[in-house]
Amino acid sequence: MIDLNKTYLYRMTHIENVPHILLHGITHRNSPNANPGFTPIGDPSLISTRDIFQLDNGKLLGDYVPFYFGTRTPMLYVIQKGFNGLNPTPAQDVVYCVTSVQKIIESELTFVFTDGHAVDCLSTQYNQHDVNHLEDLLDWQAVKSINWKSETDLDLKRRKQAEFLVLGDVAPIHILGFVVYNEVAYNRLLEMGLPKNQIHINNNHYFAI
């Protein structure tokens, strides 16, 4: 059975947002604790689509804070390379905020998860009652894949982008740590007051510059 303590969830953000996260956690933009100086890195057109996309439970996708189950996602590629009208964001400016499924369960926040990109009509949505079957409901090989282009599996990209959606703010106590690209980013987080044991350098979670 899958260990929910080690089933990690990844939320990408700009490094400039970390001081606010340390104080208030990962906040939704409509939260009373929302960051007034938030530095965005996402695709505005996709964000707009998510804002009006209705989930099976009747709530809007934009009401949730999304996490991925894996790293090196298509979205990160767009962020780093600057496609879809975005300016490129250097890898060292992108930080992964890491929590786990178990931490979210302990937070008592409501959540939904999907077996692929949340706005794709082929993706299935699951609720909290399904979480103990997580091991069987997601294609973990796809989630962990380094590349998502395949001539023999055109659905690989969708499955890689399986999402874990949290309704409400994720408090600092429920954040396990942060992953950064290099020592430059590592040192910046140290200067922000993070302890060394909560910062991990792993450039394999990013695309080559």
Image: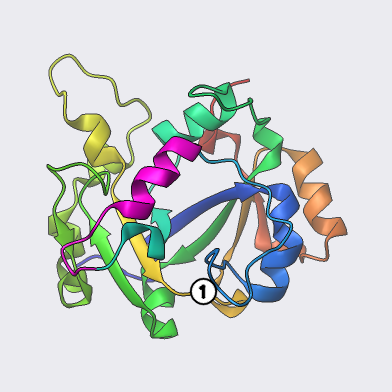
**How many marks on residues?**
1
The colour scheme used here is: rainbow
Query: Seen in the image, is 178 located left or right of residue 141?
Result: right
Start-end of magenta stretch: 43-58
Query: Can residue 26 be found in the magenta stretch?
Result: no
Q: Nearer the viewer, residue 96 or 42?
A: 42
Q: Is residue 203 visible?
A: yes
- Residue drawn at x 49%, y 28% is 78
Whether residue 72 is visible here, answered yes or no, is: no
Amino acid found under the numbered disc labelled 1: Asp
Which element type, helix, strand or loop, lies under badge 1? loop
Q: Nearer the viewer, residue 28 or 184?
A: 28
Position of residue 132 in the picture relative to residue 162 (left or right): left
Q: Residue 161 appears at what percent x and percent y?
A: 31, 42
User: Is residue 158 rendered to the left or right of residue 39?
Assistant: left
Query: Is residue 116 toward the left or the right of residue 104 in the image?
Result: left
Which residue shows up at 77% across the image and 40% down it? Answer: 183
Q: Quadrant of residue 160?
A: top left
> Which residue is identified by label 1?
169
Q: Residue lying farthest right?
A: 191
For the C terminus, the quadrant is top right
Residue 186 in percent (x, y) is at 76, 48
